[in-house]
Image (spheres, rainbow, N blue to C red):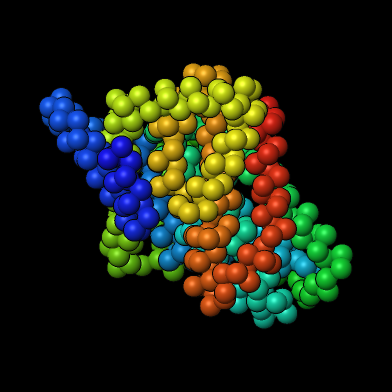
Amino acid sequence: MITAVAFLILLFIGAPIGIVLAVSATVYVFATDNTALIGSYALQLQSGIGKYGLLAIPLFMMVGEMMNGGGITSRLIGMARAVVGTMKGGLVYVNILANMMMASILGSATAQISIMSKVMVPEMERAGYQKTFAVATTTSAGLLSPIIPPSMMFVVYGVLAQISIGDLFIAGIVPGLMMALGFMAVIFVIGLYSPFPVAPPLSRSERFALLRDGLLTLIIPASIIGSILTGIATPTESAAIAAVMAYVIGRFVTGELADRDIPNMLLTAGSNAALVLFMVATANVFSWILIYGQIPQGLAAWVVTVADHPILFLLLINVIMLAVGMIIDGIPALIMVVPIILPVATAVYGIDPYHLGVVLCLNLTLGLMTPPVGVALYVAATVSDTKAGAIFKSAMPFVAVAAWVVVMISVFPALIIR
């Protein structure tokens, strides 16, 4: 009881999730006065991050830093413009397509939204789009990042669930494509009654130049996904390959990445990765305490009285996870709930852990766009100087599509391939 009280107090006063988990576990250890738990605490903390797959997190963060500093992002947007930019509302489609390509590299929604808001929102404003709509589109498209591989959330879930991260990446491809196509359908419907601007046509030489520059940068996502699908490399090794590719392209192809920028990029990527890894370490301790206290077993006994079918269980989890995602950011929320939900889902309902992982990550991704916290909303609002409430109102059709994809994935597990 005292552990639950400590957990809730720390959570509601706004303490970082890593601190909440570590302190709550410590309270339980001393409350039970169990010398075995006291002696094993540090070991459990260390073993939480002693996993090879977690090396992918700082490496993918470094890829994102070098892409942004090396001018690779702008070239991906240019290639998307050459493909769909001259259609009615073409710049909106460019936004979605560019975010799809960025999602296959960055793996972090907040990082992607921050980068793309700085690039796409001013461009859409200059073309004649309303600023709120431009921000809402960019923010919604950024939600593809935690779903289309690679994904930081998938890496963390894969480590927590002890399953193949590569197979989990593959499992996210169909849901990611479903969400992207759904977003494009929303744009098409809005375009039927909204006077979207039409971009001036591109000459053949301009289109060729944009495609040529963009195709070179596609080596990065191709090296990540291709090496995993062919079995040449693990997700961690593919992240290292992508980091090398990003450096070579930024340094020698675009010429916008300087060696003097690398130390600052390493510092930024390292500090951001340290925050995530600290949460993973404390989550391992918290999970160990939960199992010792038989919390998953108690939850299983309660849940079976409410949901007697796997689909009903998943729909119940959808509601719970949406509520959690409205308050807590994606990776911290994932770290908190997986140790509790995973044993129940697999042992009681026989749900495939890959299916469960995609459903959980989709839900938490949706939570990034929903008040009262809605981290993605506030990131976009800060970067673009727009009100978060106005962004959410304009993004509601996209949120509805994302919710529809969550339900479809929950009800039809065959959509998860691996």
Residue 340, horizontal then vertical, whole percent: 42, 32
Residue 40, horizontal then vertical, whole percent: 17, 29
Depth check: 314 or 197 in front? 314
**Residue at the right extreme of this rendering:** 192
Residue 274, horizontal then vertical, whole percent: 29, 51
> Compared to 221, does 379 lie above or below?
below
Please tell me how many numbered marks the rendered image carries.
0
**Residue at the front extreme of this rendering:** 1
Residue 68, horizontal then vertical, whole percent: 46, 64
> Compared to 257, does 285 lie above or below?
above
Classify the position of the C terminus by image quarter. Answer: top right
> Compared to 246, does 121 lie above or below?
below
- Residue in view at x 50 percent, y 72 percent: 383
Is 20 on the left or on the right of 226, as rendered? left
Please say whether residue 278 is visible from this viewpoint.
no
- Residue in view at x 70 percent, y 30 percent: 412
The image quadrant that residue 30 belongs to is top left
- Residue in view at x 77 percent, y 57 percent: 186
Depth check: 214 or 42 in front? 42
Is 371 on the left or on the right of 26, as rendered? right
Please say whether residue 34 is visible from this viewpoint.
yes
Depth check: 31 or 353 in front? 31
Is 240 on the left or on the right of 270, as rendered? right
Classify the position of the N terminus by image quarter. Answer: top left
- Residue in view at x 64 percent, y 29 percent: 312
Is 271 on the left or on the right of 371, as rendered? left
